[in-house]
Amino acid sequence: MSEIDVECVVIGGGIAGLTAAYRLREHSVVVLEGSDRLGGRVQSQSRGDYWVNLGAMFVAPEGPLAELAHLPGVDLNHLTGKAILDIKGRKLRANSPFDLMVKAPMPVSARASLARFSLRLGRDSKRMHKKGTEGRAYTDLLDSRSAADVFGVSGDARSIVDALSRSWTSAELDEISGAHGTAYFYLSMGKGSHIDDLTFPTGGSESVIHATAAALGSNVAVQTEAIVRSLRSENGIVHVEYELEGRSVTVRAKQAVVATQAFAARELLSGMPPEYIDALAAVKYGSFLCGGIFTNESGPQVWDDYSFITTPGRRLEAIFNPVSVMRKGPDRRPGGSLSFYAGGNTARHLMDATDEELIATWVPEVAEVLGCSTDIFESHVFQRWPQAVPYWSPGSRSSARVLRKSPTDTIHLAGDYLGYPGMPTASLAGHNAGNSVLTRLSA
């Protein structure tokens, strides 16, 4: 059995774990990743000038993730182009996700339902964020009910909100709590939230992963395909045992960061206080099915200046045109790429489909929405995420407060389940865990 001594061991090589390692790069660190690649649910593929994102896409304008997104090798762009709602064969342009909904062709009753939803969303968000016991009590009240119950939308309005819920949270409205849904929808649709506020890396979100890994320096060792079997803390020292290429390795460290999804953290921390185990068990995950198409068209297309197309009522929730940022000026390069997604029950129903079945199911719908022939679709790629985005079910979010503190003085948590899910939250959690480690190391 091999043995390694370091100041900190980081379990998980996604954006949370890599951010923690980057924060600790002046110290001896080993990062253990179980798969054969870094990045976790941040994944993209490229073909020549074009790329598709098959997981998390957007970065934050400030904070730890913004710092990583400005490392050499990352080219940032603001999302440009039109946000489109495709409903009942009609396409509607709007400047923000909420505008898409209120301008949709639908009965007066559905518009009224959306108007009430908008007012309720703003009111509830404001009350949730009040300081002290009042804000916490109202959050707990919303947490006790489902988002479907709290939002109260129905009919055509419900189909639009359902599609947005699946594409943003990877879950159904009746699965997520009212508090989780309110915070998530207001963050995406509230006052000042517009499509051109979104920032993403040209060439794919995975470029942030590669840039961060390259910037870790010589003090940080990164090991992929490292299967962690156990973690324990004894006498102020963390012991991690993992398998690599058929041999057992033990890491002894002063500190540890567990930067995995909540269910994996729960298994590793089985010996921790019960309240942490219960809180981690309360974190649920929705499903995402992601697809990408590389196209071979020779000239301009109708969708060149589209950024997003939301597609309620279909077997996919959204189509994203990542290369809309390149469609500026008169010189339009041949070819392109498109990403498309399904979440929640839509994704679950297709999760076991083969690539050939997905091509037969999805590709004609993409062509129908875009109004083009499938002949220009040159190649396809799919990524299945059975456990994609964390969410809190009704009655469970209050347990998240337990996870705000480290379970021990030597073990710290990091992951997107520690806030509102996404790359910014995961990176911030990794940064905060790194700060906690630095505090302990300097004590």
Image (cartoon, rainbow, N blue to C red):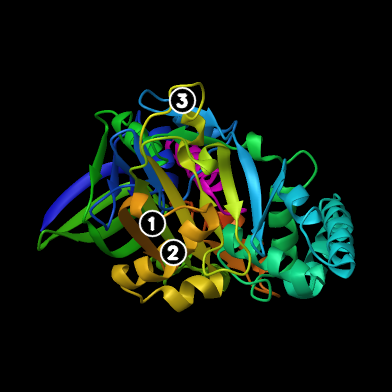
Residue placed under numbered mark 3 in the picture: 70
Q: Which class describes the residues within 10 Å of circle 1: few (<14), some (14-19), or many (20+)?
A: some
Counting residues from the start of the chain, the first of labels 1 and 3 encountered is 3
Residues 369 and 322: in front is 369
**Badge 2 is on which residue?**
364
Of helix, strand and loop, which one carries label 2?
Answer: helix
Q: Which residues are magenta?
A: 419-443
Which residue is depicted at the point 52% across and 61% down?
389
- Is 306 part of what is drawn in magenta? no
Tell me which corner region of the image, top left, top right, bottom left or bottom right, holds residue 139: bottom right
Which residue is rendered at x = 37% and y = 23% of the image? 72
What amino acid is found at the position of numbered circle 1 in the picture?
A: Thr
Q: Nearer the viewer, residue 360 or 414?
A: 360
Q: Secondary structure at mark 1?
A: helix
The one of 147 and 152 positioned closer to us in this rendering: 152
Three-letter amino acid code at the position of disc 2: Pro
Foreground: disc 2 or disc 3: 2
Vertical placement of 17 versus 120: above or below? above
Badge 2: few (under 14), some or many (20 or more) residues near its Cα, within 10 Å?
some
Residue 274 seen in the figure: no
- Asked whether the beta carbons under mark 1 and mark 3 sit within 8 Å of each other, the answer is no
Structural distance between the alpha carbons of marks 1 and 3: 37 Å
Image quadrant containing the N terminus: bottom left
Expressed as whole percent of the image width and height from the top left, the position of residue 155 reads: 77, 74
Relative to 427, is 212 above or below? above
Q: Amino acid at mark 3?
A: His
Q: Are marks 2 and 1 in contact (CB under 8 Å)?
A: yes
Marks 2/1: CA distance? 7 Å
What is the x, y in percent for residue 180? 69, 62
The magenta stretch spans residue 427: yes
